[in-house]
């Protein structure tokens, strides 16, 4: 329910009221007063839910989205039982990690009950997502809820419309049960705002959950939701997915409907933000994407492309078609930390062992990042500053674009053309990976999500490097995170101090910049141990079927 | 060949040199010194070529693009014979109408000879467009030619690259033989510039050929080319097609590659310009679209959508699937002149007689036009003025946006959002044409191309109304012109002077504005007689197969 507060109250009053309102939305029996958020505790909180949940709740919340739906459709659990189990676990996640911005329990309960009745009466499900609880980043408009997008000015203002995506999910039987926290205006890679404060990582609460879809990352990381909806302008789905060991898909623009979702810098189309799923298995991502695409979103959202789900492309890959996969371990700007190098090599080895081909691949991420940064800051924060001024909330010193001037229209057009030229150049290089002996160009490439495994709170500003994620946004390629392993302090030893050799004495490229040096030095096996390690697989624009197919192949290859 | 002129010469010297250069590119035997351009002669010049062409040349130039290719592939004519015939006829067209900006005869001849050799040696064609001469609007970059885009500053500057579309056409066997005139920066609905002056309509040279792709319109209208490439930002393919009785397709953005073509206001993506074919039959348009799409342009052009040619959609319609067609005879802003009303009714009647359904349809074109105008003038001519200043060429008083100020970036974003909202609203209304008894929404709608049959030279400024064409651009819908008939001064009588009844005494809606009144009063059966009359069929975004299928159906229904 929306926060009951006079919109003319001070930003602090509104923020305090919102914090209370989030807790108010949680059924009393799921509130455990002893649990509190910490930003310094280094111990994983992953096992804490098991102390509070019933064994049935634990069984339910161990399932991925596909398994949840299947269990309900088989009558093993009711939609209400599933909703209650995930709400309970989400409540614990929120108390521990400060990740939620609204519990929509009362309405969700009514919807789940209705679905159970329908199922009991007809023996049928209402749609492919029957009874599935879904959490959504707080950009998704749902009539009657608040949509803050991380801004205090939106507290206490119930929304008057529902975005296309939520409508599609609900029509398919989903139960939207929680809205999750995000960075201010989705423009920062940590999840921190004046609405509710900072969100932490369940694997180690002294680390960031990432951002901007970090509320989703933290909640899903603690299995407080079987499927979440995030958005990605510079890595905002993929970083939180990587930091919490999740599968997260950044679709290309125009595949999943974004229409009527709230955002900052709306109307800026130089590099579009996209919306996509985050979950515990590639199967769950497929289910989401297929369901949304099968609803023909292009008949409603002007930005959506009329491209149906291409099952044969997907199936061919899942059934073992030999793949040619590019590999970019580093971009000559920021060398990935040891566990990420191990993850890339692991993936390469398993792909090769399975008969697939690995091809060297490189993108000029320096140029990509410069263009992306210019696109993200082309209004010199004008839009964000105006929105923040509406409530008087304080600047959190998140450096979007200090000292810049807004571009003129002609400068923005020039930037748009440079973006297009960059895209064309990369496409040309991609085509050129075809071989003289008739092998086609690479199907996709693997690369780190970030050079850092995960930033500690406060470290992000120092080690922020968006080249690996942001180049994908600039190119509007399709990308999926692949959780590969966890930091093992016995294996993932620190490099030697001179930066020229790894722990085994093998040469590594010397640092190319202060940032590169800082990122390398930031790694510490003892501090980082147990954190998830992920890579991403990247396909061309609008190749969701291909990328999800490869994700499935890698999921299988990575099975212990 | 490019104009041999020092780029530091005055704009007038450069323009004069260009005019001479165009004629220099024509083989001497095709130059007929007695032929001259007139902007006042009212007599059709359609039959003049028959006085100069051989019977073989006349037979060749009577063919549409599909027939040309078939004749070459069957050995009836060689590629060189076809090139010579169309070059001869194009030379006559240019002398009479002032429509060309470059004859590329020497290079084209080498290419045609090479194709003939290949065909003689192998018995095979080099591709689906083997030997087809194609004319292109002077935005298409071809290495070594000039690409003026209507600006004097580009005279004497040979291009250093070839655009994707030309590369695809040439790879498929086409011979690009002529570049055609256009309005300055493609921003005006008549074809007039400081490069070469004004272009006239072959049906009546006191009338405009339309614009901005008017050079194509005039050339094709005189059968000086079997297929032309135009572009369309506010009707620039469709108006010249309508004024010259041609089939012209405005595809949706992202279907036909525009990359590396020259344009004004490049980088402005609020309403994108699109490129498409103009020809003498819908079959020729299909051939063009299929050939281009089958080359997978999305692997090279970042703006292209990965959507293959959907043959089943097309075939289903051509084979007689019952259609539901919306009809908007007028938009309550500008009432179409009598011949256009007759054309719409004729189409409605023939569709109904063939078992298709006609459904009333309306779009708020006032809002659409306001948004489009804002998008087209959002830089307040900044880009055009800068480009014109490079050569010092004079302003022709074409009112793009007098007295406006360039939008700020945030204002441009606001306009972008309004555009998206407008699109979503029309899509909603489109979906709502589905019926309770299970009939799906309309397949497409028919509507005038313009409320005027065609403007006389000098009249355009007074009767300019872009609502019917421009709303399609704003919506990024797919549209094809359908040439229906010709003005018959015995049938298409003027309305009664009070504007409340037509010539038969049947009531018509009273004028709603001065412009509406002026457009109605501009019609004169005697002056207009013999001019082509067209309508357009409009489908949703990226529905080229559907729209081309319906064009084929209408082509058949309109056969005498």
Image: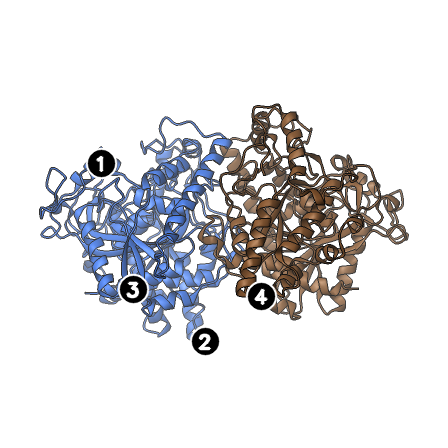
Chain colours: A brown, B blue
Circles 2 and 3 on the same subunit: yes
Local SS, label 2: helix
Is label 3 or label 1 in front? Answer: 1
For marks 2 and 1, give the CA distance: 65 Å
For marks 2 and 3, give the CA distance: 37 Å
Asked if one can make out residue A248 in the rendered structure from this viewpoint, the answer is no
Q: Position of residue A272 (x, y in %)?
A: 56, 44
Question: Label 4 marks which chain's residue?
Answer: A
Circles 3 and 4 on the same subunit: no
Vertical position of residue B419 compared to residue B258: above or below: above
For marks 4 and 1, give the CA distance: 54 Å
| Nearer to the camera, A349 or A197 | A197
N-terminal label among 3 and 1:
1
In this figure, which residue is indicated by the disc labeled 2? B122
In this figure, which residue is indicated by the disc labeled 1? B512
Quarter assignment of residue B346 = bottom left
Q: Callout 4: 10 Å neighbours few (<14), some, many (20+)? A: some
Mark seen at residue B553? 3
Local SS, label 1: loop
């Amino acid at each position: 329910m929306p926060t009951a507060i006079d919109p003319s109250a001070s930003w602090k009053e509104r923020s305090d009221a919102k914090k209370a309102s989030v807790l108010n939305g949680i059924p009393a029996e799921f509130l455990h007063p002893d649990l509190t958020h910490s930003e310094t505790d280094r111990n994983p909180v992953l096992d804490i839910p098991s102390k509070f949940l019933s064994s049935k709740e634990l069984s339910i919340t161990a399932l991925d989205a596909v398994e949840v739906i299947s269990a309900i459709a088989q009558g093993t659990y009711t939609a209400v039982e599933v909703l209650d189990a995930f709400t309970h676990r989400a409540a614990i996640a929120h108390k521990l990690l400060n990740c939620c911005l609204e519990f929509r329990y009362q309405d969700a309960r009514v919807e789940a009950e209705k679905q159970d009745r329908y199922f009991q009466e007809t023996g049928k499900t209402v749609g492919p997502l029957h009874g599935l609880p879904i959490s959504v980043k707080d950009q998704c408009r749902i009539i009657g809820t608040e949509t803050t997008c991380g801004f205090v000015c939106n507290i206490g203002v119930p929304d008057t419309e529902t975005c296309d995506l939520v409508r599609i999910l609900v029509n398919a039987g989903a139960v939207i049960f929680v809205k999750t926290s995000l960075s201010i205006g989705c423009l920062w890679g940590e999840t921190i705002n004046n609405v509710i404060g900072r969100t932490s990582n369940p694997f180690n609460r002294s680390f960031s959950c990432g951002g901007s879809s970090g509320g989703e990352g933290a909640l899903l990381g603690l299995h407080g939701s079987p499927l979440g909806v995030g958005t990605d302008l510079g890595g905002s789905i993929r970083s939180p997915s990587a930091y919490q060991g999740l599968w997260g898909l950044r679709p290309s623009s125009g595949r999943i409907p974004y229409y009527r979702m709230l955002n900052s810098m709306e109307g800026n189309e130089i590099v579009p933000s996209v919306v996509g799923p985050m979950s515990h298995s590639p199967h769950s991502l497929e289910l989401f994407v297929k369901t949304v695409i099968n609803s023909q979103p292009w008949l409603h959202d002007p930005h959506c492309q009329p491209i149906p789900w291409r099952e044969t492309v997907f199936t061919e890959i899942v059934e073992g078609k030999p793949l040619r996969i590019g590999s970019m371990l580093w971009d000559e700007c920021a060398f990935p930390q040891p566990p990420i190098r191990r993850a890339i090599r692991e993936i390469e080895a398993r792909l090769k062992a399975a008969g697939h081909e690995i091809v060297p691949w490189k993108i000029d991420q320096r140029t990509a990042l410069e263009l992306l940064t210019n696109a993200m800051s082309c209004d010199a924060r004008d839009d964000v500053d105006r929105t923040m001024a509406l409530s008087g909330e304080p600047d959190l010193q998140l450096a979007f674009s200090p000292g810049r001037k807004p571009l003129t229209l002609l400068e923005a057009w020039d930037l748009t053309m440079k973006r297009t030229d960059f895209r064309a150049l990369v496409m040309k290089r991609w085509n050129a990976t075809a071989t003289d002996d008739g092998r086609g160009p690479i199907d996709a490439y693997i690369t780190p999500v970030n050079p850092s495994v995960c930033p500690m709170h406060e470290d992000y500003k120092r080690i922020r490097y968006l080249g690996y994620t942001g180049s994908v946004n600039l190119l509007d390629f399709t990308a999926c995170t692949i959780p590969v392993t966890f930091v093992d302090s016995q294996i993932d030893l620190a490099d030697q101090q001179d930066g020229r050799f790894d722990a085994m004495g093998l040469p590594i490229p010397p640092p190319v910049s202060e940032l590169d040096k800082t990122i390398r030095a930031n790694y510490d096996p003892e501090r980082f141990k147990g954190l998830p390690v992920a890579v991403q697989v990247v396909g061309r624009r609008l190749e969701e079927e291909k990328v999800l197919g490869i994700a499935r192949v890698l999921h299988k290859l990575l099975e212990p």
